[in-house]
Image (tube, rainbow, N blue to C red):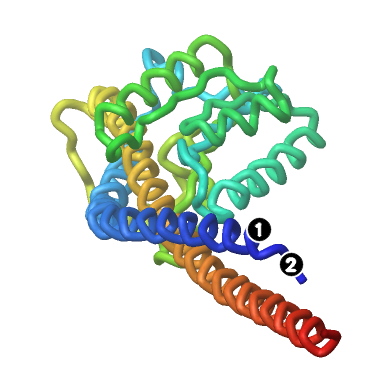
């Protein structure tokens, strides 16, 4: 039979772990409601900004002064921005994102492209440093602490634009987890270079009878809209990633809490059986001794 002291220690240790996972679950649940509201409120603004930007691009090309937004099709370099969490204990949230980026990286490398990374979150930077440290251009931590702020998105946008200006890239992609529900997060891939999608979007070009006049002109408007659209895209992705992190952590801690409860029940049963067996053995020894006398 198992040693009773060892079983008691394991039961106490598991009970302590259960209290921690229960507390983390409640904290994540409290943060999730607000994070979900902010992510859902940002979506219409992001959609409208993207539509407005694309409509303006139908009337003007990207100004030459915004060199960071001009893709060099002949360049072998591709930039990937990876938004992960700063802390773990959130289930497969980060690992699913790593699988998606690794798959995309392998596909581009097969075409002779070179991949560079800008990471947001410690988990992303740790992953790139372990697997491909030379590809890490920059890393940002704690942009979602305590919650995502627009200032953090502006800082990230400035770093991305500086990187795009220093070296010409043919493509730039953003990878993050989009919040669907507390038990479901979806990996999203957004093309940042070129930003704003394709000019051949049928939904935007089907009505050729509409004439739009811009004041100031469309190119001057793009000078303002393009950086603002990048900031909006990054801010929205930070909100989505933060909500996804809280939902994934709540689900993971709930599962860990149930598993800890099951383990405590099993250990308690084993402990009681071992204790009863020890008592029975002691009684047998006492009775045998008395009979021998």
Crowdedness near tag 1: few (<14), some (14–19) or many (≥20) residues, C-alpha within 10 Å: few
User: In the displayed structure, does residue 124 sit left or right of residue 196?
Assistant: right
| Pointer 2 residue | 2
Q: Disc 1 on helix, strand or loop?
A: helix
Real-space Cα separation, disc 1 to disc 2, in angstroms? 8 Å
* Residue at point 61%, 78% (across, down): 272
Q: Residue furthest right?
A: 292
Which quadrant of the structure image shows residue 130? Answer: top right
Question: In which quadrant of the rendered image does the C terminus lie?
Answer: bottom right
Q: From the viewer's perspective, is residue 21 above or below residue 181?
A: above
User: In the displayed structure, does residue 253 sit left or right of residue 111?
Assistant: left
Q: Nearer the viewer, residue 14 or 217?
A: 14
| Pointer 1 residue | 6
Q: Nearer the viewer, residue 67 or 137?
A: 137
Please state the horizontal and vertical placement of residue 108, each as a whole percent of the image.
Answer: 73, 36
User: In the displayed structure, does residue 174 sit left or right of residue 152?
Assistant: right
Q: From the viewer's perspective, is residue 9 above or below residue 183?
A: above
Crowdedness near tag 2: few (<14), some (14–19) or many (≥20) residues, C-alpha within 10 Å: few
* Residue at point 56%, 47% (across, down): 94
Please state the horizontal and vertical placement of residue 157, each as a whole percent of the image.
Answer: 37, 25
* Residue at point 77%, 86% (across, down): 290
């Amino acid at each position: 039979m198992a040693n009773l002291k060892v079983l008691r220690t394991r039961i106490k240790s598991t009970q302590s772990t259960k209290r921690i996972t229960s507390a983390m679950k409640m904290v994540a649940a409290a943060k999730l409601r607000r994070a979900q509201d902010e992510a859902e409120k940002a979506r219409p603004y992001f959609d409208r900004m993207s539509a407005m930007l694309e409509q303006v691009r139908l009337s003007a090309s990207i100004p030459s002064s915004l060199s960071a937004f001009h893709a060099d099709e002949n360049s072998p370099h591709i930039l990937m921005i990876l938004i992960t969490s700063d802390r773990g204990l959130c289930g497969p949230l980060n690992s699913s994102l790593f699988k998606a980026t690794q798959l995309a990286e392998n596909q581009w490398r097969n075409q002779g492209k070179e991949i560079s990374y800008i990471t947001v979150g410690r988990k992303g930077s740790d992953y790139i440093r372990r697997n491909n440290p030379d590809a890490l251009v920059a890393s940002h931590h704690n942009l979602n602490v305590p919650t995502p702020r627009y200032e953090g998105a502006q800082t990230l946008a400035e770093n991305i634009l500086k990187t795009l200006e220093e070296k010409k890239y043919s493509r730039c992609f953003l990878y993050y987890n989009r919040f669907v529900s507390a038990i479901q997060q979806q990996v999203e891939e957004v093309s940042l270079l070129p930003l704003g999608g394709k000019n051949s979007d049928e939904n935007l070009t089907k009505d050729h009878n509409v004439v739009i006049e811009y004041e100031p002109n469309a190119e001057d408007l793009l000078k303002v809209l393009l950086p603002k659209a990048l900031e909006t895209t990054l801010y929205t992705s930070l909100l989505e990633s933060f909500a996804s992190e809280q939902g994934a952590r709540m689900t993971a801690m709930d599962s860990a809490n149930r598993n800890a409860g099951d383990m405590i029940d099993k250990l308690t049963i084993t402990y009681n059986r071992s204790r009863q067996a020890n008592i029975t053995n002691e009684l047998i020894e006492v009775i045998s001794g008395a009979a021998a006398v």
